[in-house]
Image: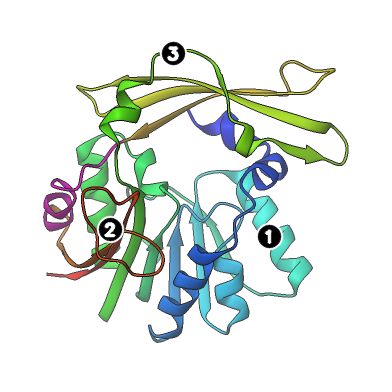
Amino acid sequence: MEEAFYAEARLYDLMFPGGGASVEFYRAQAAGSGGRVLELGCGTGHKLIPIAADGSSCVGLDLSASMLAEARRKADEHGVVLEWVQGDMTAFDLGRTFDLVVIAANSLLHLLEADDLVSCLASVRRHLAPGGRLVLDVFNPSVRMLAEADGVRRNRESLSFTDPDLGRVRVEVAETYDALAQVTRGTWHLSTDTDPAVVVAPLELRSIFPQELPLLLELGGLRLVSRYGDWSGTPFDGASPLQLCVCEPR
């Protein structure tokens, strides 16, 4: 269902330019890991290309051919060599192990069913080398924000951007929240003054609440070692916007 959302990889990069503290956090994790890094849901390589530029041996896996094509283009542009694999993070077999597996930028939340989450985590477990770790980040669900997802189309000014060809692109989103499924169902509208429908795409994301995350990890053969609430390493609490988790085999 998310294929249309990620089909315009160049526009995605303009809307979500990446960089900053999150990249530096994952670069530091990779530097201390031993060198072999796998990122699931790697997208256009926001985090993996800088990690590879630091000297790590990197593999990026993503379901979207469009996102991987943009990742390859960017890696070539920067003179960085990586391996890119089109595949499903719920069940993959790369025939090797890694010192660090990364699932960044809410990528895990594309897995809407608990069985798929556990299958993904179990696949990660099989791909971890001795002493290897999984590091992931997902948002900490805000009950208030979920309750405000009423289906009304609203402007996301902070995500609007300027494209060299299209000019200023507005971003508007209409979302509803399915509390039983723990899934936010949205429609994203990208438009310009001359084109009201540059992109109209559905996007569904699951919420993973803090108390259930350790249980999902355990079912996948992993355990939570540390959980932070931001990129500076502040201990996680209920008000933290982020669940930044370091995990290892149990």
**Which residue: 29% across, 39% down?**
141
Helix, strand or loop status at disc 2: helix
Above or below 241: residue 162: above
Residue to which mark 3 is pinned:
151
Above or below 90: residue 185: above
Above or below 28: residue 65: above
**Which residue: 41% across, 77% down?**
29
Q: Return the disc, 1 or 3, that comes first in the chain's sequence.
A: 1
Q: Return the disc, 2 or 1, that comes first in the chain's sequence.
A: 1
Q: Which residues are magenta?
A: 207-218
Amino acid type, callout 3: Gly
Task: Please say whether residue 96 is visible from this viewpoint.
Answer: no
Graded by Cα atoms within 10 Å as few (under 14), some (14 to 19) or many (20 or more), the crowding at tag 1 reads some
Residue to which mark 2 is pinned:
123
How far apart are the alpha carbons under marks 1 and 3?
36 Å
Report whether 242 appears left or right of 226: right
- Asked if the residue under mark 1 is in contact with the one under mark 2, i.e. CB atoms within 8 Å, the reply is no
Helix, strand or loop status at disc 1: helix
